[in-house]
Each structure stands twice: as C-alpha cells, then as structure tokens.
Amino acid sequence: MPQPVLNILSLIKTPALAKACGQWLKGGRYQLFQVDPSTEPPEPLVQRCGDVDGLLLEEGALEGSFFATLHERGLELPAVLIGPVSGEVLFHGAEVRLPPDQLEQLSYSLDAAVSRFLRTHTPPASSEAQAATPEGWKLSNRLNGRLGYLSIYYKRDPSRFLRNLEAEERSELLDSLKRSYRDLLISYFKNPATANQAIESFVNTAFFADLPITKMVEIHVNLIEEFWKQLMLKGQKNDFLQDYRLALLDVMAHLCEMYRRSIPADVPIVPAPIPEASSPSA
Amino acid sequence: MPQPVLNILSLIKTPALAKACGQWLKGGRYQLFQVDPSTEPPEPLVQRCGDVDGLLLEEGALEGSFFATLHERGLELPAVLIGPVSGEVLFHGAEVRLPPDQLEQLSYSLDAAVSRFLRTHTPPASSEAQAATPEGWKLSNRLNGRLGYLSIYYKRDPSRFLRNLEAEERSELLDSLKRSYRDLLISYFKNPATANQAIESFVNTAFFADLPITKMVEIHVNLIEEFWKQLMLKGQKNDFLQDYRLALLDVMAHLCEMYRRSIPADVPIVPAPIPEASSPSA
C-alpha cells in the first residue's frame, strides 16, 4: 500500500463529516490534519495552509474573507470542497466538489484536485518568468517534484483502481458513482454550470479509478431504466429519456479527452538498426 | 522525419492503386516493396512474406489458398487490406480494412495493423511456453524489439498527429475521416459486422492521428446536418436521425477504451522524502 505522500489540512466544522473523511482516506497516500475552523482564529489557520499540500473544505464552514486572504498570499492550494454540486466556485477554478453522500470517492477527488491544480498552475518555461512567480507556482513546483509527475496529468495510483479494490469497497465505489451520475442526469438539462461540475466530478473518479468504459455505459443504462420504470408507473411520458444520451456523450467526450491528454508525450520514432535476414528479397 | 523502420510487402494488382499507396507512404516509417501478385507464382510470394514485417493487400488480388499457406507456415503478418468495409475477414482477425477512397489514412491503418497484431500475438510470459511458440510469435517478438513498444499499444508517431501535419495534408486527412464516418453511419443500423469494421477503421485513425475529441464530434454533427438537409429537401421524415447518436457513442466508447488501455502501466507510488518546512504545524 502506498504511504502518505501528501499532507492535507481538513477544515471541516461538522464533526461527523470530519470523522467520515478521515475514515475514507485511511491508509492511502494522503495524510490528513484536522482542524475545526470554527474554533481556530483566521490568522493561524492561514499560516497552517502555507505548510500543507492541499485543503479539504466544507461548504459554509469558512468565510469568504478567509479565501480572499489565501488568494492575496498566493496560497491557492489544491482543494476538495464537500458540498452539493451547484455549479458555484468557492475557492478557485481548480477546486473539486464532492457531495457528502459520495465520500467513497474522496481519495479520487483529492487526486483530481492535485491534478487540476498542477495543470492550471504550471509555471512558464522561461527562467526569467519563474523568478517572478508568486507563491502558488513555487508550491506547484514543490508538488511536481514530490509526485514525480511526468505529463500534465497526475500519476494514478493503481492500488486504487476499481479492479484492484476489495469486493466490498468496489461495490461501495460503484454505488457512489451511481449517485454521482444520478446527480449529473438530474441537473443535465436544468443547469449547465451544475451539470458541468457533476460531469467533472464523475469523470475524475472514473479516470483515477480506471473505470472500464463498459461499466460507465452500464451505470447510464441502469439509471435510465430506473427512470423509465418510475415514469411508467406514474403513467407519464418517457420518450424524452433518450435525450439523456447527450449526457452520456458529454461524459464520455470529457473522459476520452482526459485520457488522450494523459498519454505521455511520444518522442519521434528513432530508426532501429535493421537486423540481418529481415531485408526483403523484393 | 522518422526513417523507415518497417518493411511492408505490397501485393496489389491494380497499378493505379499500387502507385497511390506508394505515394501515401512516401517519407514515412514504412518502406514499401511492391510486387504484382498476378505475375509472381505463389511459392516465391510466400517466401517474400517471411522476410517482411507486414503486408498490404488488395481485395480480390489473391486466392484464398495463398492465405491458407501463410497460416500453415505461421506467417500471420500485420496486414492492411484495401477494399470496401464489408465486415468480412480475408486473412486474419487482426487485419485492418481501408476503403480505396480513404487512402489518406494508409499510414495510420498500418500503425493500427501492427498494433492489433502485437496485441493479439503477444507471446505468453513463461519461457517454457515461448520455446514452443510458432513462427508468428517469433515475428511479434522481433517486431516488439524493433519498435521498442512499451505497453500493449504501438507507439504513436507524433509527426503524423493531425496538429503536426501541413495544412493541406491536414485537410485531406479530415476529408478522408469524414468519408470513413459516413460509411460508418450508413452501415450502422444495417449490418453490425460492417459497422464494427467501419468503427474500428475510424477509431484507429483517430487514435494514431491524435484527433481531438471535439473534432470527432464536429465530424458527426456536420454529417447529421447534411443528412437532415437532404431529407428536408426530399420532404422525408428526419426524426430518426437522432438515433445516430448511438453510433457516436459507440465510436467514442471504442476510442476511449483504446486510450485507457494505452496509458503505460502505472507503478505504485513510492513515498518521496518529505522536504523540510513542509510538515504541517497542525
């Protein structure tokens, strides 16, 4: 099992939620440090943020002024925000949102938060530009170094792949993904910002859990069937359900693009010396 | 520009087709040796096959007995077959079919043929089993060695990526892909075997050309719009066109799975030494 490589500061007010988060990250690559943000004064909290690699946040637990201070000091850390998928951004554009009923995906959300952060905070190539970088870039350099990441995407942890989980954990993760996908379908035609966040959240977990594409299609088909049965029972129209194929297309396009970009940059093919007896007689 | 690393024996009867193939492969990583199969006796032809890395075939140019002989001698080479997408298999299951009006994709089809061959002909891990392998496996070992391929997929050649092509070549490739996609849509609800071959062919080129997913969706949307306009002009029903989203889903699922499997196997995360000043004060 991988040992903790990243220190995460958990600023969660609700005790049950803080406890649950701790349990879902136990034994993984994240070391959690829990602080109740309602009892700690803002300045020491900000100071602590400077010492960690990422934040775990709870919606509503911290004032907007706290995040403003972090921005001012260049402390835009990778962050997972526990709260309903709403389309809103609390801290910064690279934050990852996870609803409290889907905590099974917490480790994948943290992976995604680090990955998104590294992508959006990669320092410019020139050394002159680097000399003038704010704190955030130094931090991303530090993260890059510690994770040894190769491409623009974060290295995945194969011990967290769906197929490598214990049967019980695997089924919990699939149920959790099903809840994420249900949120996604429900918001899809109602609110584009919410839907985008839900897609992002689902795709992140699918990527970091190396979810087979057939499994993803299965989740979609099963949910649509459930919806169909409910509508049948109520005697309502259900022919609009096939419009939801657009949602699946959207999810798949996102995931496919994520995979496409995570293939390490190919180097030009170097001609190999042609071994004897392989020159054609033509 | 990559120098030729693979020798391909072209067994094409139609002179214009043979010439066109030669032109589309010029300067790439494939070295083409052309032989007219209608003038060469079968035995020398089979002999030549033993000396090359792959075959370029024309539908109808060779007898079934020729392929039977290759099978008997364990000469199941990577092969691209120029002919209409029909769902039929001429040589073996890993062959790649390319219609003659889509030759712009020939180099990608050869990439795909080698890749498919390596996937289906990878020798078993145990050395005991290797000692008893037929010719085909020895060949795949030789190909593996020469290409230095890392994962189950063949290394892509970045100089052939869509974005790295000259403007004219880029537009030719996109037009060619559009023709492939049209074949795919036309066969989609008619003949599953043909459709599968068409999907395979399109996805191969998309993968080896590193086609952005948005471009793929664009090809789909433009073709559906064209169909829609044609049906409108003829005063025919067009609401069934949205069923073609299933075709796009199918293509995307194939491509996504291809990308997913082509990411090099991740190694478990090794904990990095934690640098000074990064231990949290919590």
Image: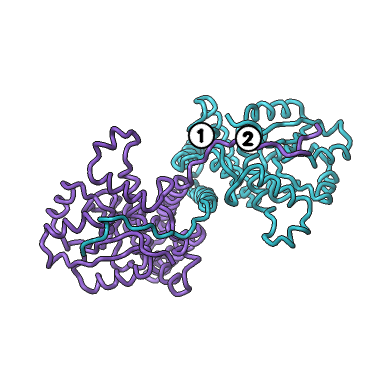
Chain colours: A cyan, B purple
Q: Which mark is residue A162?
A: 1
Q: Quadrant of the C terminus of chain A?
A: bottom left
Frontmost residue, B104 versus A171 = B104
**Residue B261, x across and y down, in percent:** 44, 45
Choose top left, top right, bottom left or bottom right for residue A179. top right
Q: Chain of mark 1?
A: A
Q: Is there a contact, CB below 8 Å, between mark 1 and mark 2?
A: no
Asked whether the viewer can see residue A181, the reply is no
Mark 2 falls on what kind of element?
loop
Q: Residue at x 85, y 46 (%)?
A: A65
Report whether B53 appears left or right of A156.
left
Q: What amino acid does circle 2 point to?
A: Pro
Mark 1 falls on what kind of element?
helix
Q: Residue at x 34, y 67 (%)?
A: B25
Q: Residue at x 63, y 46 (%)?
A: A115
Q: What amino acid does circle 1 point to?
A: Leu
Frontmost residue, B269 versus A92 = B269
Circle 2 is placed at which residue position? Answer: B271
Q: Chain of mark 2?
A: B
